[in-house]
């Protein structure tokens, strides 16, 4: 199915998407027992195609490009060439190498192998993973969110430029309190009145970037584009915070890590490794916090919905729907709180790094 | 395990996308927005300060007015006082002058009266002396006509004149 | 008992600890806010930060559960 047709179908069958979803579950139920863990993991993890729903047994999806860095250079092809196969059956030839997709991982078959073979733990024995730079559904959704952010904030900026007296109109009036919130409640108190200005672009960007992706993760039709619940995403952002903290650390900051002032010498030696570990634990906890919060939220919602299929009865549906509605409402609050927490803790670390001796 | 292993592809794209977003938004969104917001805040602050200044100036002005009014009033008071003093002085001097004049007049009058009186008394004395002399002449003439009587008189006089 | 089961119990224990911790933070924050309503905003943001620190412990439990999954 070509992407264009897919998009047209998406628009056409948006209204009956849940019907299609239910149909698929019924069919799979007849074939194999419903496995909630596999379903949940499938939704929480990244994927190489944007699976929207199944229609009469065949999946309707947006094919995304696969980009691989192999020993033979860069190669790319459409994920539709795997024909929705995720079990390593379909072999795709590209740039003189053959690839298979197994559990959303691309494997490159070793030279001479014509099909993939496994060891006792179902790990491939005659294939290895090339460097995978594919535009996965998370990358795709990230770009959608970036486009939306640019649209919102460039419009806001133009709004200010056009108004003569600096009074916000339209979307700027909605965004300004949020921006001022980040500045007055996060930047100023955590970093300090004099130095916060330098960090404002980072804090604002990270706040809105995380928030919008948290919200995107909650939209059901996007089938859990769980970007902010993906550890690669939170890892990257935490690394940015770590780099900025480390590079803006002043003499006082490093002195507190390596030679804590105001305590006896044995204590200084004892504290040094703890402080060094602490330096790394801070970004790691940032990474884990965002990842685990968002992923746990998705898992709970999906687990509640799976109850319907586990018990194979529609009678449980009201309970499932009510509970998952409740959790979804909580998750909507959590989207904002986690973006706030990530930003405020980043600001706190910057503030610690730039704090002057007193 | 798979869930908590960061995939390299997503890390790569996230880093690139985030840097792109940071640069674009930082340059074209945050800078103008924060600039406009802080500019407006500065404007509001400046307006408030100038309003405060104007209020203070007004206060100063009214205080000035009050002061001037007060000064004018006290000046008027002083002028009135001066005038009153002047008047009093004038009256006082006039009074004293008049009194002195009167006293002088009275003294002159008294002196004139005294002189008149003296003259009158002197006149009277003169007249009385002439009169007494004439009387005494007559009396003596009469008395000394009789010898016995002269003797008697000398006698009584000698008796009265005790020598002590 | 499988290793997954033990991990699940551990994650549950971590959640209990974090629950107690966040409960204490919330309770104290409410008390402080009732006592000083003018400090409402400051107390709320500090409480949120502290809750995030405590919550990290429970999340490590969640991650352990994911590790087994």
Image (cartoon, rainbow, N blue to C red):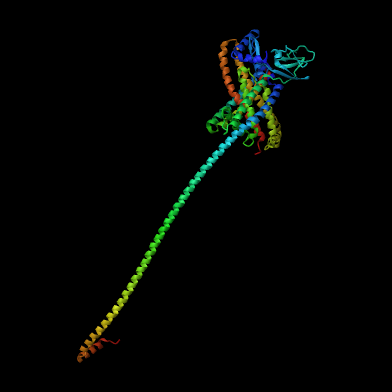
Task: Please say whether residue A340 is visible from this viewpoint.
Answer: no
Q: Position of residue C36 (x, y in %)?
A: 53, 33
Above or below residue C39? Residue A217 is: above
Which image quadrant for residue A269? top right
Q: Position of residue B55 (x, y in %)?
A: 51, 42
Residue nearest the observer in this picture, B134 or A186: B134
* Extreme-bottom residue of the structure: B147
Q: How many marks?
A: 0
Above or below residue C66? Residue B83 is: below
At 58% from the left edge and 35% from the top edge, which residue is drawn?
B40
Left/right placement of residue B102 relative to residue A26 reads: left
Q: Position of residue A302 (x, y in %)?
A: 61, 16
At 54% from the left edge and 39% from the top edge, which residue is drawn?
B48
Which image quadrant for residue B100? bottom left
Q: Position of residue A49 (x, y in %)?
A: 68, 16
Task: Please say whether residue A152 is visible from this viewpoint.
Answer: yes
Above or below residue B99? Residue A337 is: above
At 62% from the left edge and 15% from the top edge, which residue is drawn?
A10
* Extreme-top residue of the structure: A30
Quadrant in the picture for the C terminus of chain B: bottom left
Quadrant in the picture for the N terminus of chain B: top right
Which image quadrant for residue A132? top right
At 62% from the left edge and 32% from the top edge, which residue is drawn?
B32
């Amino acid at each position: 199915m070509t992407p264009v047709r897919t998009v047209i179908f998406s628009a056409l069958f948006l209204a009956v998407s849940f019907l299609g979803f239910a149909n698929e579950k019924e069919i799979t139920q007849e074939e194999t027992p419903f496995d909630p863990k596999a379903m949940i993991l499938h939704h929480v993890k990244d994927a190489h195609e944007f699976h929207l729903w199944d229609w009469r047994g065949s999946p309707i999806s947006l094919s995304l490009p696969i980009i691989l860095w192999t020993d033979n250079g860069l190669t790319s092809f459409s994920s539709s060439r795997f024909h929705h196969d995720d079990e390593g059956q379909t072999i795709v030839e590209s740039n003189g190498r053959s690839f298979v997709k197994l559990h959303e991982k691309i494997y490159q078959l070793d030279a001479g192998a014509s099909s993939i073979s496994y060891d006792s733990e179902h790990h491939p024995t005659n294939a290895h993973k090339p460097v995978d730079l594919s535009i996965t559904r998370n990358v795709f959704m990230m770009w959608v969110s970036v486009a939306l952010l640019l649209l919102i904030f460039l419009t806001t900026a133009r709004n200010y430029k056009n108004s003569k007296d600096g009074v916000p109109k339209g979307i700027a009036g909605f965004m300004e309190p949020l921006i001022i919130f980040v500045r007055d409640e996060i930047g100023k108190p955590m970093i300090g009145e004099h130095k916060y200005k330098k960090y404002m672009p980072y804090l604002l960007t990270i706040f809105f970037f995380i928030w919008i992706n948290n919200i995107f993760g909650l939209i059901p039709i996007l089938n859990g584009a769980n970007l902010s619940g993906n550890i690669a995403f939170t890892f990257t952002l935490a690394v940015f915070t770590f780099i900025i903290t480390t590079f803006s650390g002043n003499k006082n900051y490093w002195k507190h890590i390596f030679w804590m002032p105001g305590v006896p010498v044995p204590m200084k030696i004892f504290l040094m490794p703890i402080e060094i570990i602490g330096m790394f634990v801070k970004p790691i906890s940032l990474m884990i916090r965002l990842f685990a919060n968002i992923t746990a939220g998705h898992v709970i919602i999906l687990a509640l919905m799976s109850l319907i299929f586990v018990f194979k009865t529609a009678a449980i549906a009201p309970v499932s729907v009510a509970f998952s509605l409740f959790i979804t409402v909580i998750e909507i609050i959590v989207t904002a709180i986690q973006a706030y927490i990530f930003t405020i803790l980043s600001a706190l670390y910057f503030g610690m790094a730039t704090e002057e001796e007193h | 395990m798979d869930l908590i292993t960061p995939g390299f592809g997503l890390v790569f794209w996230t880093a690139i996308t985030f840097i792109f977003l940071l640069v674009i938004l930082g340059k074209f969104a945050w800078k103008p927005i924060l600039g406009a917001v802080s500019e407006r805040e500065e404007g509001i602050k400046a307006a408030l300060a100038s309003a405060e200044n104007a209020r203070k100036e007004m206060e100063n002005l009214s205080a000035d007015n009050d002061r001037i009014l007060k000064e004018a009033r006290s000046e008027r008071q002083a002028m009135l006082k001066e005038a009153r003093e002047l008047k009093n002085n004038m009256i006082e001097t006039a009074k004293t002058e008049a009194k002195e004049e009167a006293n002088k007049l009275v003294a002159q009058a008294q002196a004139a009266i005294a002189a008149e009186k003296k003259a009158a008394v002197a006149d009277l004395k003169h007249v009385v002396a002439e009169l007494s002399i004439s009387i005494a002449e007559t009396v003596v003439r009469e008395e000394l006509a009789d010898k016995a009587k002269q003797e008697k008189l000398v006698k009584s006089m000698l008796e009265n004149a005790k020598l002590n | 008992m499988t290793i997954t089961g033990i991990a699940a119990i551990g994650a549950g224990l971590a959640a209990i600890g974090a629950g107690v911790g966040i409960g204490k933070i919330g309770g104290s924050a409410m008390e402080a806010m009732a006592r000083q309503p003018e400090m409402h905003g400051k107390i709320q943001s500090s409480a949120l930060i502290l809750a995030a620190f405590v919550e990290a412990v429970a999340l490590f439990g969640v991650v352990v559960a994911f590790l087994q999954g």
